[in-house]
Amino acid sequence: MGIHGAQRAMQLYPLENAAVQRALDDLLAMTVSLLQLEGMIEVRLTSDVVFINQTRLRLGLDNFAAFSGFVSLMRNTGIGVLRIETGVTRSEWQNWFRLLAALPDAEDPLERLDLLRKRMQDAEITCLSVDEGAAEQEEGDEADEALERAKRTYAHGVSVARDVVAGVRMGRTPSVRRLKRAVQLIVDQVLENELSITGLTTLREYDEYTFTHSVNVCIFAVALGRRLGLDRRQLYDLGLAGLMHDIGKSRIDIEIINKTSSLDDQEWRRMQAHPWLGTLTLFKMREGEQLPYRAILAAHEHHMKIDLSGYPRPIRPRRLSLFSRLVAVADGYDAATTRRSYQTEPLEPESVLREMWMNASRGYDLTLVKALINMLGVYPVGSLVVLDTFEVAVVAGLAPDPEQLNRPLVRIVFDAFGGLVPPPGQLVDLSVARPDGSFARSIVKVTSPDRYGITVSDYFI
């Protein structure tokens, strides 16, 4: 591996040595080539297995020494994840290896990791970052670890969205690099375990709506794009479009955004300005080629509707871009299923999907709505359902059998006697049949979490 080779060369020879220079050149060329394909590189150590993004590194006789040396490096420094971002330089690699060599001995590798992080920050190494790895785990704990990673990714996305909105309101230009990293983490999480991250879209806190909505739209759009066969680079651009689609609202008075009653004509006209205000904001943020035009176009078009009857009204006939139509579908679904300042009673997911499909005046691309329905299932994750056993449950996952979409995975919230089952609740597969072919549980109807006084997201975190 290039990292192991460069590290060994710097241990054995002075910096000026040709072998060191060649090893650094080879490592930089390797990372730049991979970054052009992937957008970001994440090297992850799980037990004794190394993953590069989602690809497991295969161990053979030809790479055994390098593999073992790299695993030892990661373990001795407490590194579980090494992330490499676009823009990494030869100098950053060189400085990073120097910091590794200068780390003092410590019984606890995590102490060395904390010190390494601090020194990397002091040395202004911005395109390389390290994180703690997951603790050794039994196979049965893998789902819990996947959920933990999803929670960290989701929380990071919300934090970045919050900072971007605050920065724009204060007249600052947000960091495109930080935005891209947040989106890359979300895309990687969707590709690794879509259910773990989409389940977190039930975290629709009222006070955090502006930020969680942006992250949710990003997640839904990326998950849809994946179903359509978009490659990783396209998914990165689509995720950025989803995360930034409502950035124009940061330039609208907060009193209008948070108004609980109907908007008057003047306020509504101001609200309708947010797509082109977002377009102007994103153009200002565009640094060279770092911000894709497709993200800017989605901010402008996501309320236009497929028949162009929405806003802003186009000057001449046009066909909405695929990214704009994807973001519009993701935006419409999440907005309708969320409690907001002027929508104290969110609609049930199943009802929202039916409305998006049946009501042409909503202006969505019906092919993409159908893809959303197929992705979320008849009963989307987060729906609260009543079973024929008198139990109440939260839909926790799609039906394992694609032929039985009406029989998803659920977590029991209330037992048959009305007793509250503490989170995370008992996981039940409704598609499992008895020996005689009958089912132990079936869904009777969808109900409202407010009626039972529960918070759906408690059963996903």
Image (tube, rainbow, N blue to C red):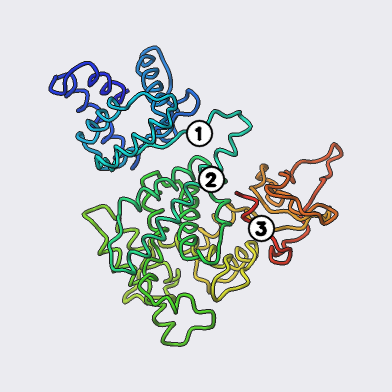
Q: Quadrant of residue 308?
A: bottom left
> Mark 2 against mark 1, which lies toward the viewer?
1
Report the amino acid beneath label 3.
Ser
Amino acid carrying label 1: it is: Ala
Residue 104 pos. (x, y %): 33, 26
Local packing at callout 3 (Cα closer than 10 Å; few below 14, some 14-19, many 20+) is many
The quarter holding residue 435 reads: top right
Q: Looking at the image, which residue is at 44% across and 53% down?
A: 157
Q: Which residue is mark 3?
A: 383
Specify which label sits upstream in the sequence, 3 or 2.
2
**Residue 367: horizontal and vertical position, in percent?**
51, 59
Q: Which quadrant of the figure has residue 202?
A: bottom right
Residue drawn at 34 percent across, 69 percent down: 169
Mark 2 highlights which residue?
194
Q: Residue furthest bottom?
A: 265
Residue 361, above or below 18: below
318 displayed left or right of 54: left
SS type, badge 2: helix
Q: What's the residue at 85%, 54% (across, down)? A: 417
- The amino acid type found where label 2 is placed reads Glu
Which circle marks residue 134 in the picture? 1
Callout 1 secondary element: loop
Rendering coords of residue 275 (x, y %) = 37, 71
Position of the N terminus by quadrant: top left
Residue at 64% x, 47% y is 397
Query: Left or right: 278 with respect to 359?
Result: left
